[in-house]
Image (tube, helix red, strand yellow):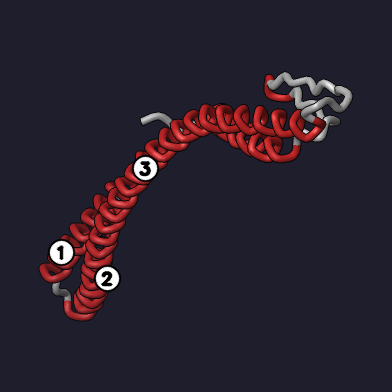
Amino acid sequence: MGEIKHNDLEESIRLAEIGEYLYNRSYSYGNGYDEPREFGIEWQWQQSKPNEFGQGALLAEAVKWHSDMAEDGLSTEATKLRASIEKNAKTLEHWRQEVGKLHSQIASHTSALAERDARIAELEAALKSAEDALFWSARQHHEYGNSRAQKATELSAHSARAALAREQADA
């Protein structure tokens, strides 16, 4: 689907204004003084002396003419406006669907990030435990000379640090 174009919106507004103008003017003209020349409407009021039909008949004819013009103009403009509104509604629905897809992707990524953060927390806890064990092993080694326990603890701490570094690098 396409996007809503600024020109389409301006055109819709212009058509609505024309329709409103024509509708309102169909009731306000006919007094013999106003001459609508906007929007391509050409009409000239011909002042005449009262005749056997009188000014009332001429006024009624002018009002009917304007009413017919307004109905024709409104019908044409309303059709154009309706088509533009339908096009914009389809475009809006398309973008609503796109936004829905993006919300789904965001939820998926948020879930993956939460899982990764939980894994990092586990690795940090393992590293803390290995560092504590290393500290106590070093203390024991210092006090008792137990080098095997120290080497095993150092290896465990090194493994935990490496796993944490890999996990953080992947993030």
Crowd class of label 2 (few under 14; some 14 to 19; many from 20; radius 10 Å): some
Question: Quick one: label 3 or label 1, which is nearer the N terminus?
Answer: 3
Residue 77, x across and y down, in percent? 54, 29
The residue that disc 1 covers is 151
Amino acid under disc 2:
Lys
The residue that disc 2 covers is 128
Amino acid under disc 1:
Lys
Please tell me which residue is depicted at 21% across the width and 61% down the height of the picture.
160
- Give the mark toward the camera: 2 or 3: 3
Classify mark 1: helix, strand or loop.
helix
Residue 93's disc is 3
The answer to whether residue 19 is seen in the rendering is yes
Relative to the observer, which residue lies in front, 166 or 76? 76
Q: In this picture, is 108 found above or below 17?
A: below
Crowd class of label 3 (few under 14; some 14 to 19; many from 20; radius 10 Å): few
Please tell me which residue is depicted at 72% across the width and 19% down the height of the picture.
42
Residue 7's disc is none
- Give the mark toward the camera: 1 or 2: 2
